[in-house]
Each structure stands twice: as structure tokens, then as C-alpha cells.
Image (cartoon, rainbow, N blue to C red):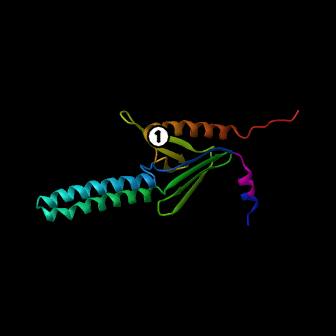
Amino acid sequence: MSTGNEIERDSEVQIFSAQLTPHRSLNRSGFLAVMLFLSVVSFVTGIVFLMKGAWPVFGFFGLDILVIWWAFKANFRSARAREEITVTTTELRVRRVSHRGQVAEWSFNPLWVRLDMEVDEDFGIEHLYLISRGHQIQIARFLGPDEKASFYKGLIEALNAAKRGPTFNPVT
């Protein structure tokens, strides 16, 4: 059941909406292809050591595959995280979902929010922050420096549009 405020919020026009996710190095089929290739190379190398009489080494070649598999699984698990940022004329909403499914939400008045950044002279934008009335949260953590610059520009334009308010188109 929804209240009047939720209906108003749902009917409000979004000025800006972004869903940010971590970069994934491979999809499932790429993961399987890499693991198959590494397994074959490891097995063949193990056979070579076995034929030369270094049979104790053969068992260690399975451990490297196990470690690589674990690293990819950790990468896939962390890729479930996401950050959703929405700007309307009355609200800037940040919704962060961790890789474990934990949700944190922040809501700001776009008239009072300020976007700040830390810039490294060699690497570009390192961190983006939303600051409003003493609260500061870091956003766009998944993005690289160039992507952060583009995101910064788009979010600044959206905040400026929100500060101008809704546009009124009179019917003539």
C-alpha cells in the first residue's frame, strides 16, 4: 500500500538517474574458457614434471588452479554490488547495495547538496563526495578517473537543473 507522498515521489520527473556497478573482468563463458585453458596448461606442465621424476610437484599444480578459481569467485561476488543515484527537483537519493545484499540509503535536498572531489595531479579524480549539512558520503567508488570526471559533469548539470526547479510549459 502506498501513501500520498510515495505517489507524488513516483510521479516526479527524474532529472538524472545512474546505476553504477563494479567492472567485471569476464563473463561466465570467459571465466570457463580461462579456467579450462589454465587447467590444461597446469596439467600438461605437471605431467612434464612427473615424467622427469619430480612426482611430488605434480600435486601442487592443482593448487594454483584452486587459488585462481577462488580469486575469480571473489571478483564475481563483489560485482553484485551497485550504487543507484537519482536526482529529481526535490530529492537526490543515493541507494547503495553491498555485494552481500545490504542496503543503505541517503536522501538529500538538491538545493543544499554540494559535490566535492579529491584530485590527484597524476591520476585525475580520485574520490567524489556528496556534502550536505555536515553529512558527507563518497559516491562513484567503482568508477575510474575518466569515468568519474564524466559522472561529475553529468551530476553537476542535474543538480543545477534541480536548483532551477521544474520547467513550466504553458499551453497556448
Residue 44: % across, % down: 24, 56
Q: Which residue is mark 1?
A: 117
Q: In the image as oriented, which residue stretches furthest toward the left?
A: 53
The C terminus sits in image quarter: top right
Numbered disc total: 1
Residue 52: % across, % down: 11, 58
Quarter of image, res 127 = top left
Residue at the image point whose x is 44% and y is 54% from the top: 29
Secondary element at tag 1: strand
Q: From the viewer's perspective, is residue 145 above or below residue 35?
A: above
Q: From the viewer's perspective, is residue 19 above or below residue 165?
A: below
Q: In the image as oriented, which residue stretches furthest toward the right?
A: 172
Amino acid type of disc 1?
Answer: Met
**Closer-to-camera residue (21/58):** 58
Q: Is residue 91 left or right of residue 103?
A: right
Q: Which residues are magenta?
A: 7-13
The N terminus sits in image quarter: bottom right
State the predominant SS element of the stretch in magenta: helix
Q: Does 137 appear in magenta?
A: no
Q: Is residue 13 left or right of residue 117?
A: right
Residue 107: % across, % down: 60, 53
Q: In the image as oriented, which residue stretches furthest toward the bottom?
A: 1
Residue at the image point whose x is 78% and y is 37% from the top: 168
Q: Callout 1: 10 Å neighbours few (<14), some, many (20+)?
A: some
Q: From the viewer's perspective, is residue 12 above or below residue 100?
A: above
Residue at the image point whose x is 20% and y is 59% from the top: 47
Residue 35: % across, % down: 35, 56
